[in-house]
Image: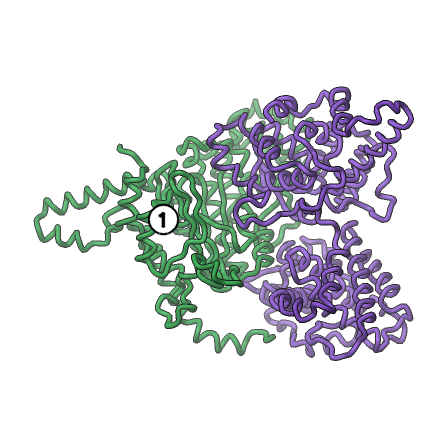
Chain colours: A green, B purple
Amino acid sequence: MGENFSPELLRTYYKTVFPAELMCRWLGYGTSTAASAQQRLLRRREFSFTTGDDVYIRYLSYNDAKAFRKDLVDKLPYKIDIGAAFSAPPSEKKKFTVFQPVQRELIFDIDLTDYDFLQVDASKVETCDACWPIMAVAVKTMDRMLRHDFGFEHLLWVYSGRRGIHCWVCDERARNLTNEGRSAIADYMSLTLKDGRMAVRVPLHPTLASIHREVLLPFFERTVLSNEGMGLLESEAGWGVVLGMLGDDALAASLSDEYARRASGAERWEALKRALERNKLSRLALELEFTLSYPRLDVNVSKGMNHLLKSPWCAHPKTGRVCVVFDPQTVDDFQPGLVPTLGEVMSQIDEYDDQQAALGADAVEAARATDVLHKTSLRAPAELFAKFVRGLEAAARSTAHAEAARGAQAVQW
Amino acid sequence: MSAAPLAKRPRGSIGARRSSLSMYAQAPDVELAMSELEECCYMRLRLLRCIDHAKAKGLRSEELLGVIDKAEREIMRPAGVWTDEELHRDQCSHFLLRLAFCRTEELRRYFLSNEHELFKFRFSGQVGDVARFLLDNGMPYAPIGEAELDEVLPHLQNVRRSVKLAKDGAASVKEDHYKVPFEEVLDLVRGRRVFLRAGFAYVPQSELISIVGGQVRARLSRALVDASRAWPSVQEAEADRLSAFLEHCSTQYMADDYAADKKAAHGEVSLAQLPALTKRSFPLCMEHLSSKLHDNSHLKHQGRIQLGLFLKGIGLSYDESLTFWRTLFLKGMAPDKFDKEYKYNIRYNYGLEGAKKNYTPYSCAKVISTVPSAAEHHGCPFRTLSGEPLRAMLSRLSLKPTDVARIAAKAAEHHYQVACGLYFEARHAGSSLTETEMGGITHPNQYFDLSMKFYAEIHAAEKQGVDGALAGAAPAQALAHETDAANAAPLAAPHEMAVDA
């Protein structure tokens, strides 16, 4: 296999593959054809680039996809970040006395490195891939809370290219949240670690109870404990970590002895639960189940309007993998190892064109007209993204109708 | 907030027909002399400050309401009842202080949070006219219907049990609930103290204050932002009259923000002194960060900012600060990586990059409010560690078991700043802090300054008593002696750092 990531690959990628038009339609939220420039959201959106020599350029903004793509090709950013939509175009911010963020998606960032019990070696991407199931649990948990509890519908889930995931909640209501609202949601969704464990109150809040029952426990039994999964209680090192979380050395020592005699992770877990019950510490077992499976959010990312987050469709410079969007419904089937790198994307295009060339001139003509993304394994995520953007545009169109109806219903101030 | 039934609280005083409860929607149209304006502003400031102190001491619920009740009586209405004149003053002072506290984020936060508390107190003391008040202020809340209530009742009861709002028996009582967009009850959302479905929060009658308080807060927050936009023109128009007074109000009544351009009381601090000072005079939050930094040769972003700004606040120069971080980080990474990824951070803290603002060190309120995730060490250890890890850490610092127990107990009661005050006392034999009006620590740099003052006094006393000949010795040298003698420091390699500098 050739190289995964290089400035040359990046140039071709930005020039021909990167879905700049869709990106701009997304961030335009149905305003890209608005009559007055002030109404067009895209031009007030901050982009920032990190270049190959680590120069960080903030407050870039673009009028349309053409300008965006041109600048990408000119500057070849290794990383693209997206910030808030401001009261004025960021690139002209010096001209305005008032320049402040006016809307911003509610964003979430989950990174494997926050799961300290996993001992992931971030430098080996395979070890990160192996831990994907725990990311999948995070996706299912958060997707459910955001939709069911908060009523959000337009959730864009993105693989960050190496060992994490991002979520962009794009509903208008989410974009208009105050910092305080963001921080309240982040606190609602995250559990704090106390003494190395996630503290939960019993009885559980109904939301946590159903997530525990329907998402966490099945994962815990099938993946955390099972030998086919992470097998956390299969090795002495693994159960050492878990027993350490008990914060009770005597109990841990006695269990450790017992563990050596037990055959499987599931049996060891049962032994732990029985021991805790005997000691009237049943809640600890529940807390361990949460600690070892509940998502660990980087809440600081979510709490402010002005936090930047890496754009979908970037390529991760360390792995070369494209930051693709994925469907939370089928997150269990997502395999980070199959996400193409820039190098692979380019060879897929060449392969496709070669095949068509073998078929004759008509096929070559047809290939020329084909969306270049459709020649690659980025096709499925690109179609998902396009569908997502259409959903947003439809929502924006119906807002006008809904406004009248909602105005009558909602509490009036 | 406790869920004390609204109707149970006695009214402010017998026969008080008029109410001070107000959303402050419209500025009053009354004429008052300058001196009167000033006086009523000072009165309100005293009240807000009492509230702020009570909160810093960790008072909650009924205790907090009690303190506000007492303070409000003494300060705002000595006669016991609200007279028309006092109500006017209440209105005027609120609107003037909006202007005084609109100029920076920090000021707005101070004003907003204390006014919010004051409103909640007044609302909780209100009896018959709550419904009227809500209606007059455009909050036509009505309970959800029977059918919907029955449908969600099991969830509502589970929430109440999970937050111990009610005993198991009481939780099954069917209480009226209000259905509101979740944005209106953020404090209930934050604590997972409410049932949410499809963007709506189901709020029990007893938590109505949460909705109303949230509204007040949101409106005031917007009003403050509006005021900040209007401020430049007000400032100009009132240049000869109110401007100076209003500016004075906000600076005088805020706690010292330890901005670096204010000269630190103890003069500059040098890199060579740092190891000894860390051990002797750093508050636990900074000591903790510093030791993690030494252990790991790394700190995550928030930790770098919290410690970095603190160091700036105690008077470490930019150059020395850079050397400090560089020396420690380079044990774990290549120099060019440091220069590329971390130097910016330090320059940023000193206002040399980015927004180029002169960032002020974090106050306790800010530090306490930040929650570190795994592998992060910022925040307030009295909050983030608690329990056994906290006790272990305090014991490692060779505190007496009795002190450890006292401090951990305060921390467990969520009185983090009081715990910090006790910690100060434990580390500064003979000092008393918690007994004084101050109660607890409000700012990590205040802790440091108090410690410096404590040792300066001891030093002065010793110098007088023991050896007059040393009178010429600079304080820095005195400190350096102490380093060698007293601290075979557990912190890594202080000398290396000094050499590098």
Instruction: Locate residue B76, reporting x and y percent.
Output: 84, 67
Instruction: Locate residue B190, reporting x and y percent.
Output: 63, 55
Q: Is residue B30 visible?
A: yes
Quarter containing the N terminus of chain B = bottom right
Q: Nearer the viewer, residue B139 or B381?
A: B381
Quarter containing the C terminus of chain B = top right
Q: Is residue B33 left or right of residue B235?
A: right
Q: Is residue B34 above or below residue A90?
A: below
User: Residue placed at 88% from the left, 30% from the top?
Assistant: B461
Q: Amino acid at mark 1?
A: Trp
Query: In this figure, what is the number of numbered marks?
Result: 1
Secondary structure beneath dot 1 equals loop
**For mark 1, does the 10 Å Cα neighbourhood hold few (<14), some (14 to 19), or many (20 or more) residues?**
many
User: Residue placed at 48% from the left, 28% from the top?
Assistant: B334
Instruction: Locate residue B88, reporting x and y percent.
Output: 79, 75
Q: Which residue is mark 1?
A: A313
Residue A207: name its quadrant: bottom right
Q: Nearer the viewer, residue B493 or B357?
A: B357
User: Residue placed at 69% from the left, 26% from the top?
Assistant: A250
Q: Nearer the viewer, residue A316 or A89?
A: A89
Residue A40: name its quadrant: bottom left
Q: Nearer the viewer, residue A220 or B461?
A: B461
Instruction: Locate residue A181, reporting x and y percent.
Output: 58, 59
Q: Is residue A311 left or right of residue B429?
A: left
Q: Is residue A144 above or below residue A254?
A: below
Chain bearing mark 1: A
Q: Is residue B174 visible?
A: no
- The outermost residue toward the left is A360
